Every structure is written in structure tokens, then in C-alpha cells.
């Protein structure tokens, strides 16, 4: 069942486009907007309605799949912005879902301000599962927001995710995603070091991947990234630049709570090296290049 006022998705990047495909398939109706209009061609061919501005995409439920909070905030003001669109469309108390990974602290402040000043209900629902999970409609969503609003979004979330967990109030989803990114980045770094050690001792990379995958060291990270390590193809995927951004948020959250951050500091420094070396747009599994570079 489509929520009242319809659903729109803004941001048709590597994650947003497959999510839009699944939303069209499950809901039967979706409005999309992307800063580069050509990115909407595929989903429009499947039945989505293309909006020419965020204002035209101002539905009752607006999903944003954008890298960081400043890109979401930029959608709001002006005659072509969401706020003007919601007013023009007579949408009261719209829901704005932030799927990107952003600062938990900034998201809490953003949600409180929009609720108080504009009556907008902000829900944070960062994702895990990568592009393959988005394509299969099997993402894991970590959700922050008030219970009734989150419950009303179940048909939308069920279209794109296999697992949806409400973690608490606004911002708590982002905090859970920060925890997720510590595990992902740490696992990638450990696997890259293991592959390097094996090769320096003359072991086959492919054989090690097989052995690890069938043992306790097996993981979803290894399953999804193994082919990249075997072929050294790091194009597309989840960028090292975004991984670094997420780790900065994780360290800030750790500092705010006085939590230990030894692992965060280590992997943050490794991904910082990768980005500074010019590999920031590569998939984060390309950290192997950084670790093996003299």
C-alpha cells in the first residue's frame, strides 16, 4: 500500500537507482528526481514519473539517497525546493527519509529543526548491503525516528530491504550505521593485509579466498568483494571517499561518548592514505592497492 501523498526518491546513484527499480515493482508508483536527468532514463522506462525539480517531487514521503546531509539540505529552499513543493501540493507533515550515511549529531539537529520550524518528520534510514543488496531488494536498514512514522513507512522499506530495525529516535539509525562501518572497514583492512601476507609467502590469492570463505573468517564482505580482489577491478561500488567520510562520523561519535576508537583511528588512517593517493573514487576494497604500495 502506497503511503498517503505518494512516494518519491531523489538521488539515482549506484544505490538509488536499484532502490527505485524495486520501489516501482512493489509499490507500482514512484516519482524520481536526479540532478543529472539522464540518470532517470532506466527507471522512467519502468514506469516512474520524472520530476524536473525537487519541488515537483515533493510527495508525502520523500526518500533521499545522497552522500551527505548538505546535499539533502540543498533540496529544501527556494521556489524549486521541497519546502515550496510541499506547500504548493498541500502536503502537511511530510516525511523526509535520509538514506545516506551522515553525522548522527548533525542529523538529530536537522530533524529537530525541521520538525519545529516546518512540521517535517525526518527519519534516518542508512543502509548496509552494498549495490548487490540494493539490486536484490535485500538491504539492511538501520532506522531512527518516532515509532508511528517508522511503522507507516513499512511498505516502503519492505520494498528495498530484507531487514529493517528501528534503533530509536532520529539520529539513532546513523549511529548504528557508524558501528556498521567500523566493522566493514575493519574487515576490509584485515582481509587486505591477509591477502598481502599470503602472496608475499607465495600462496595463491584465489586459494586463500576459498579457504577463508568456508571458515570462521568468512563474511558478507568477503563474499561481495572477493571477485574484486581476484581481478583487481575496483571500479564502481562503494567508494573509499565515502568510507573515509563514514569513519570520520564514527570517530566523532566515539569522541562524543568517550568510547574507545583504536580500530577506527587505524582504519581511518588507512583510508585517508588511499584517498590522498588518488584512489578515493575506487571501491573501498581497493585498499589492497594502498596496503601493497611501497
Image: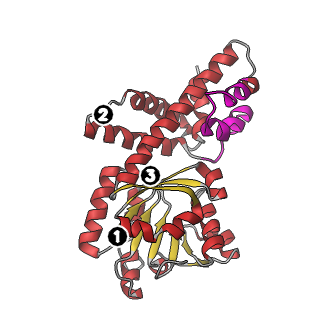
**Colour theme:** secondary structure
Quadrant location of the C terminus in the rendered image: top right
Q: Is residue 110 left or right of residue 51?
A: left
| Contact between labelled residues 1 and 3, with CB atoms less than 8 Å apart | no
| Residue at the image point whose x is 28% and y is 70% from the top | 115
Residue 227 seen in the figure: yes
Q: Nearer the viewer, mark 3 or mark 2?
A: 2
**Real-space CA distance between mark 3 and mark 2, rounded to the nearest whole angstrom:** 20 Å
- Percent x, y of residue 61: 45, 74
Q: CA distance from mark 1 to mark 2?
A: 30 Å
Q: Which mark is residue 224?
A: none
Q: Marks 3 and 1, Cα distance to the nearest angstrom?
A: 18 Å
Q: Secondary structure at mark 2?
A: loop
From the viewer's side, name the closer residue of 290 and 126: 126
Mark 1 Cα shell of 10 Å, populated few (<14), some (14-19), many (≥20): many
Instruction: Locate residue 151, reporting x and y percent.
Output: 43, 68
Asked if residue 82 lies in the magenta stretch, the reply is no
* Residue at 26% over, 34% down: 258
Label 3 sits on a secondary structure element that is: loop
Mark seen at residue 101? 3
Q: What segment is highlighted magenta in the picture?
A: 208-237
Q: x%, y% of residue 229?
A: 68, 33
Amino acid at each position: 500500500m502506497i503511503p498517503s501523498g505518494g512516494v518519491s526518491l531523489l538521488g539515482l546513484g549506484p544505490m538509488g537507482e536499484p532502490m527505485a527499480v524495486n520501489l516501482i515493482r512493489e509499490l507500482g508508483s514512484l516519482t524520481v528526481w536526479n540532478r543529472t536527468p539522464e540518470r532517470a532514463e532506466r527507471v522512467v522506462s519502468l514506469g516512474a514519473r520524472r520530476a524536473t525539480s525537487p519541488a515537483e517531487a515533493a510527495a508525502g514521503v520523500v526518500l533521499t539517497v545522497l552522500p551527505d546531509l548538505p546535499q539533502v539540505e540543498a533540496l529544501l529552499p527556494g521556489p524549486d525546493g521541497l519546502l515550496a513543493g510541499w506547500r504548493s501540493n498541500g502536503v502537511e507533515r511530510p516525511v523526509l527519509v535520509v538514506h545516506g550515511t551522515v553525522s548522527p549529531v548533525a542529523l538529530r539537529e536537522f530533524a529537530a529543526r525541521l520538525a519545529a520550524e516546518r512540521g517535517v518528520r525526518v527519519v534516518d534510514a542508512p543502509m548496509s548491503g552494498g549495490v548487490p543488496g540494493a539490486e536484490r531488494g535485500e538491504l539492511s536498514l538501520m532506522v531512527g525516528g518516532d515509532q508511528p512514522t517508522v511503522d507507516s513507512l513499512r511498505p516502503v522499506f519492505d520494498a528495498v530491504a530484507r531487514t529493517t530495525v528501528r534503533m530509536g529516535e532520529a539520529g539513532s539509525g546513523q549511529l548504528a550505521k557508524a558501528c556498521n562501518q567500523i566493522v566493514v572497514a575493519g574487515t576490509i583492512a584485515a582481509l587486505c593485509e591477509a591477502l598481502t601476507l599470503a602472496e608475499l609467502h607465495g600462496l595463491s590469492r584465489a586459494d586463500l579466498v576459498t579457504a577463508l570463505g568456508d571458515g570462521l573468517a568468512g563474511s558478507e564482505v568477503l563474499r561481495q568483494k572477493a571477485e574484486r580482489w581476484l581481478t583487481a577491478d575496483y571500479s564502481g561500488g562503494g567508494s573509499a571517499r565515502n568510507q573515509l567520510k563514514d569513519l570520520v562520523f564514527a570517530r566523532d561519535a566515539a569522541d562524543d561518548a568517550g568510547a574507545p576508537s583504536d580500530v577506527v583511528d587505524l582504519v581511518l588512517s588507512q583510508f585517508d592514505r588511499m584517498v590522498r593517493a588518488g584512489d578515493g573514487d575506487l571501491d573501498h576494497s581497493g585498499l589492497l592497492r594502498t596496503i601493497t604500495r611501497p
